[in-house]
Amino acid sequence: MKILITGGCGFIGSNLSIFLKKKKLNIFSLDNLFRKGSKLNEKRLKKNKIKNFRVDICNKNQINKLPKFDLIIDCCAEPSVSASINELDRVINTNLFGTLNILKKCTTDKTKIIFLSSSRVYSLDNLKRLVPKKILNKPINIKKKIDMSFSITGAKSMYGFSKFASEELIKEFSYIYGLDYIINRCGVIAGPWQFGKVDQGFFSLWIWNHINKKNLTYIGFGGQGHQIRDVLHIDDLCELILKQIRNIKKIKNNSFSIGGGLANSISLKKLTKICENITKNKIKISPIKKTSAYDIPYFVSSNRHVSSTYGWKPKNSLIRIAEDIYKWQKTNHKSLKHILNQ
């Protein structure tokens, strides 16, 4: 099977490309190297004998000139919610019209697609209602898990809209052209080779700042660091996608919620403690009470559907995720400085 991974020099794309290549699959990458760190990842792909097409996903003429593939795994996206406010045209062009170009290519070549969507497609108002305002300054003890049935009606963020609109485009192409697809709505993914920053990749950012004794902030919801996310190790996501590839002829045209689940859910305050234990450093973390209208206090994914379908569940704990990132950052500290020091 000949597979193209778009966004192949990004965090998810590069790890997935190398993982699948080691499983003896025929892997190619597409990435225009726009993001910081992408050139470093391209070198990793070359070491693993994976060709990267330096093509912008928004350039439909270049996309059409690519060779045929049996499967395209679409990991290409601008994942920053704040960028969808400040750079709206670029986000919509990349995340929506880029997907449209890929879908047209799939239709022409009769190619299957696995699309990496986002937990950000869900209703912001309904997500915020999960945590009553009166307890936002206290540790959050609710155990709600969010699955595909959760409300998608209403505002999502411009980024969330671009991913949801892409999901709907995929379904339209499937209905009209018989396109075979899988949609994965991913929560927070973390692990080595994630170049974390404030609005995307917080797990990596937290460890990096502790290693380098750089201050951080708890932003929003009282500024106490009680907001919660579930976190999935990149290796667990790669294992799942391998299962999806191997079963795509019989399990297709389906959508899944994917994340670390309740066992891998954590507040920023608890993440701070983990970072202190691993790095042996303690840093100053200041409170900022206000946050973006797009921010949410709580999100934990339900893996019930994907687990029952594929017999898959996350294997890596939060501690393992933190330790793997720490080892990677310490080992590559010199080369990461110009990328991660912001």
Image (cartoon, rainbow, N blue to C red):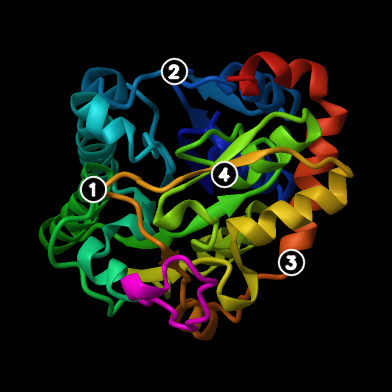
Q: Nearer the viewer, mark 2 or mark 3?
A: 3
Residue bearing the label numbered 1 = 157
Q: Nearer the viewer, mark 2 or mark 4?
A: 4
* Disc 1/disc 2 C-alpha distance (Å): 22 Å
Q: Relative to the observer, which residue lies in front, 102 or 34? A: 34
- The three-letter code of the residue at mark 4 reads Phe
Residue on which the image places disc 2: 34
Circle 2: residue type: Phe
The first of marks 2 and 3 along the sequence is 2
- What is the secondary structure assignment of the residue under circle 2? loop
Which circle, 1 or 2, is nearer the viewer? 1
To which residue does mark 3 refer? Answer: 317
**Residue 251 in the image, given as x and y percentages of width and height:** 42, 74
Cα–Cα gap, marks 2 and 3 = 32 Å
- Which is in the foreground here, disc 3 or disc 4? 4
Q: Looking at numbered disc 3 in the image, what kind of residue is underneath it?
A: Ser
